[in-house]
Image (cartoon, grey):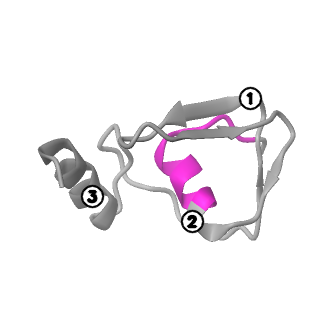
Amino acid sequence: MAPADVGALEMHMAGKKLDGKDMPEVNHDSVTLASYYGFYDDEGNGRFWSEGQVVTDPADIELLLERDAPLKD
């Protein structure tokens, strides 16, 4: 694992977002994207979601929250 990956993993394990802020409590079965959102992960794989897309996978919800993705209230 690259040093940058280790740092991100340590923040994740500590309940921190990528910006170092605390992760919000997740009490959602789903979240809805307020606008298009995407990024390329460390392996170069694209992760993209469409505006209005309903996300139900817990791992994806956590990832979106961790990265401050634009979500509808």
Q: Residues within 10 Å of mark 2 (few under 14, many from 20)?
A: few
Q: Residues within 10 Å of mark 1 (few under 14, many from 20)?
A: some
Q: Earlier in the sequence, mark 2 or mark 3?
A: 3
- Relative to 2, residue 24 above or below: below
- Relative to 46, residue 9 above or below: below
Q: CA distance from mark 2 to mark 3?
A: 14 Å
Q: Quadrant of the N terminus?
A: bottom left
Whether pointer 2 and pointer 3 mark residues with C-beta atoms closer than 8 Å, the reply is no
In magenta, the rendered stretch is: 60-71
Q: Residue at x 37, y 53 (%)?
A: 22
Q: Residue at x 50, y 41 (%)?
A: 45
Dot 2 corresponds to which residue? 59
- Relative to 23, residue 51 above or below: above
SS under mark 3 = helix
Kindly give the residue lying farthest to the top in the view shown: 36
Residue 34 x %, y %? 78, 34
Q: Earlier in the sequence, mark 1 or mark 3?
A: 3
The image quarter containing residue 13 is bottom left
Q: CA distance from mark 1 to mark 2?
A: 18 Å
9 sits to left or right of 57: left
Residue 72 x %, y %? 78, 41
Dot 3 corresponds to which residue? 9
SS under mark 1 = loop
Residue 67 x %, y %? 49, 41
Dot 1 corresponds to which residue? 36
Kindly give the residue lying farthest to the left in the view shown: 3
Amino acid on which disc 2 is placed: Ala
Q: Quadrant of the C terminus?
A: top right
Whether pointer 1 and pointer 3 mark residues with C-beta atoms closer than 8 Å, the reply is no
Residues 35 and 15: in front is: 35
Amino acid on which disc 1 is placed: Tyr
